[in-house]
Structures are given as C-alpha cells and as structure tokens.
Image (spheres, coloured by chain):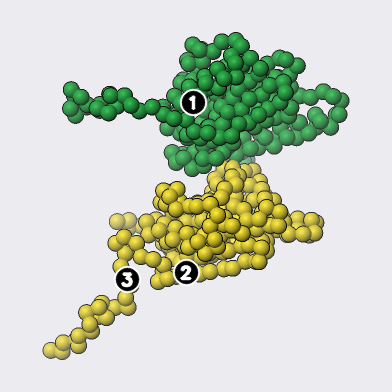
Amino acid sequence: MDRVAETERTLYPYVTGSSVVAIKYKDGILMAADMGGSYGSTLRYKSVERVKPIGKHSLLGASGEISDFQEILRYLDELILYDNMWDDGNSLGPKEVHNYLTRVMYNRRNKFNPLWNALVLGGVKNGQKYLGMVNMIGINFEDNHVATGLGNHLARPILRDEWHENLTFEEGVKLLEKCMRVLLYRDRSAVNKIQISKITEEGATVFPPFSLKTYWEFSAFKNPTLGAEGSW
Amino acid sequence: MDRKVDLSAPHSMGTTIIGVTYNGGVVLGADSRTSTGVYVANRASDKITQLTDNVYVCRSGSAADSQIVSDYVRYFLHQHTIQLGQPATVKVAANLVRLLSYNNKNFLETGLIVGGWDKYEGGQIYGVPLGGTIVQQPFAIGGSGSSYLYGFFDQAWKEGMTKDEAEDLVKKAVSLAIARDGASGGVVRTVIINSEGVTRNFYPGDQLPLWHEEMEPHNSLLDILGAPEPMSM
C-alpha cells in the first residue's frame, strides 16, 4: 500500500527555466525572463516563452519545471474560461489569480507532489497595480518588485537600490535590462535571449525576443594575472 | 573489465533520434541499437514508429516505456480520427504523447520526438523530453547520442532546406553520433513525411561517410596484402 503512495510524488525537475524578474511601474507591471529551457547543465531549449498573459488583467511568469508551468497554464485556461462563461461583465483580476495559484501550489505541497515552479503574477485592474509571487512550497507574498531563483540574490539588491514609485516605461525597461544583464554574467543557466512583457489597464504586450550586449573590456579581464603569475 | 554483465538490465535504447522540418514536410531519423546493459539486444531496431498515416514518433530511453506510450497514442489517435472524420493533426498527436508523459512522469523514462504533416500547418516537429514538456521546434534531437550533435546542428542547420538537403543532414548527424556514442549504433533509418505521403529509407554502415579515425571496411586482411599464397612448410 505504501508503494502506491511513494510513487505519487515529484522527485526532481527535468526541463527548467531560470529567473523571472518583475517590477511595478507608473502604468502597470513590467516582467522579464530569458527564453531558456535547461536540461540539467545543458542549455537545451532556447525559445521557451516563460511569461504568458492570463485573462485580460494579468501576466504569469514562471521558473522551474516547464512541464509543470505548461500544466498550470492549462488550469488557468479553464479558470478563465469558466469566469468568462458567467458573462456577468466581471473578470478575474491579478489578486484573484494569485490567490488561486497559491491554493493550488500549497495543496500540492501538502500532498508531497509539488508543481516544481516559482511563479510571478502581475497585473492591473481598475487602476490598481498588483505584483505577487508564489513558489512550490506555497510561500507567497506581494511586493513592488519580485524575482525568482538566482534573481533573488542578484536582481533584488539592484531593485532595492534603484526602484522607486512611478518609474516611466523607459526607466523600467532599463532597470530590468540591468538585472537581466547581471543574471547573464553570473547565472550559468541564463541564455542571451530575453522577453520583456508589460501589462497595463489597456492590456498585455509581450515584446519580441532580443539579446543584450555584454561588456568585457576591463584591463583586469584582459590581463588577470598581472603581477601575480600563476593566479587566476 | 566487468566480469559480471547484467543480462536482465532493462532494455534501453541509448539512441540517437532526430526530427527536422524542411520546406514541404519533415524528415525523422534514428539509429538502430537497443542495449541491455552492455549487450546489444537488437542491432537493427526500428525506433521510428507510426502513430497515424501522417504522424510518426521517434522513440528513445526505455524501450518498454516508449513502446507502450506509442501504442496508447496510436489507439487514442485511431479513435480520434474516426470521430473527427479526417486525419488527426500533428499537434493533437504530440499533445496526446505529452499527456501520457506528463501524467506518468514518475514512472516513465522516455524522450520522444513527434513529427508529421497535416494540411493545416504543414510539416511540424514537437519534442517531448523527460517530464512531459512539449516544445515545437524547427528541428529536434534526442537520446544519448544527441549530446554530440548540439554543436553540429548549431552550425549546420538552415531554415528552408530542400527534402534532399534535410535527409542528408539527418543521415550525417545520426552517423556522427553513432561514431561517438557507445549506446547508438547499427543502421540509420529515415522517414520522410510530406503532402505526398511517407517514404522509409535504410542506410547500412557502408553507405555512410567515414569520420575521424574510421577506416574503409574490408572482407579480410588478405585482400589488403594482395593475397600472397600461404606458405606451406
């Protein structure tokens, strides 16, 4: 009997996405993620969309197991469909979607069969901006800026320093790009193909993928062992 | 050297599998080695399996798991075709494979490449790796031999190839992987699927190019030495 219970748990992820970074700005939310799907240490897939619009008011970004993210998108499809079928002029906002996801993630965690993801849910409804996060063990919170994975360690310090209320779109994009560049330098599962998305009262826009320039022209990079032959 | 070989190790297709789109359809390719531990249980397996008239799947990983998944998907697709009244699309076939792979991820160990042609989207290739992620790609590689092909494809792949260019690419790639991956070997099989139908091809070792440190095969040393008469004492 125990054998049956033992086999119903996710043990480890296979195809994973790296960090997601998101911030509130003047008109709504900006979210960035690279398009990489890693298979262990191999950078196997380089065109995976890890940020998707949900309904009219939200964006969902995910890191972690891609198959679980694809399954979550299916759950949300059904949720939004049923919401539309009420045909009552009301629609699920980002706070409600975040709450739904939190329940799903926490309940799966209690059954020892988690969806192996860290999710970022952002959106705007009726002028109210919302940005929240929930992960595979059910930890959830909302904040002005969030990040998953290595982004927690590399991007959030930058955001704590440089984020402020009422960033313009241009300032927001530049700030996210700064974070993504650091992740590109320092996260080995990062891939140089990034998608930035925004959501405002008007709706969601997923911008086309692009690559960031990187800087290597430090004299210490060119000559790292100057004065210390044999070191690195 | 191992003294004990495990002859009851599960049959695993070490494998190299490839699926490539071209302007008009897809070309699927695979090696033919199935191993049980270090023993080659089948040196001429067919890893490209039919799901419908217009959709085939390349199988890798556990032989048993990939066979049972293909069997179930073929069964579901058959029913779906009857109910739909027309050939199933490649996307539906790939999603059925994904459903089985994802919902049984704790039990299965199989990576699959689904490829085919339908009248709506033309030639398509979908990768379904371990875990049940589904990814549509212009080309896909899988199996243990694929490790040796990431660099090759990064350089050799081009958009808009002809049917012959695509098949040559697949043949070359599988043969390169066989050269370096102990778990891949045997013959190269290809399946070409387009609006006209399906073509199966078979390329034994002597029809493939030779790579670094490989030599022309001969029947005997004696042929090379110019066949001197054996000395009689």
Q: Residue visible at 43% across and 38% down? A: A41
Q: Which residue is mark 2?
A: B203
Q: Which color is chain B depicted in?
A: yellow
Query: Dot 1 falls on which chain?
Result: A
**Observer-nearest of A232 and A168:** A168
Cα distance, mark 1 to mark 2? 47 Å
Same chain shared by disc 1 and disc 3:
no
Residue A14 image point, x, y percent: 52, 40
Q: Which residue is mark 3?
A: B216
Residue A35 image point, x, y percent: 54, 35
Left or right: B143 as drawn, with respect to A143: left
Q: Residue visible at 66% across and 27% down? A: A59
Q: Is residue A86 above or below residue A44?
A: above
Left or right: B165 as drawn, with respect to B116: left
- Other residues around mark 3 within 10 Å, as few (<14) / some (14–19) / many (≥20): few
Q: Nearer the viewer, mark 1 or mark 2?
A: 1
Amino acid type assigned to the residue bearing label 1 in the image: Met
Q: Which color is chain A depicted in?
A: green
- Other residues around mark 2 within 10 Å, as few (<14) / some (14–19) / many (≥20): some
Amino acid type assigned to the residue bearing label 3 in the image: Glu
Cα distance, mark 1 to mark 3? 52 Å
**Observer-nearest of A96 and B166:** B166
Q: Nearer the viewer, mark 1 or mark 3?
A: 1
Give whichever of discs 2 and 3 has the lower sequence position.
Answer: 2
Q: Quadrant of residue B38?
A: bottom left
Answer whether labels 1 and 2 touch (C-beta < 8 Å).
no
Cα distance, mark 2 to mark 3? 16 Å
Q: Which residue is mark 1?
A: A180
**Observer-nearest of A79 and A200:** A200
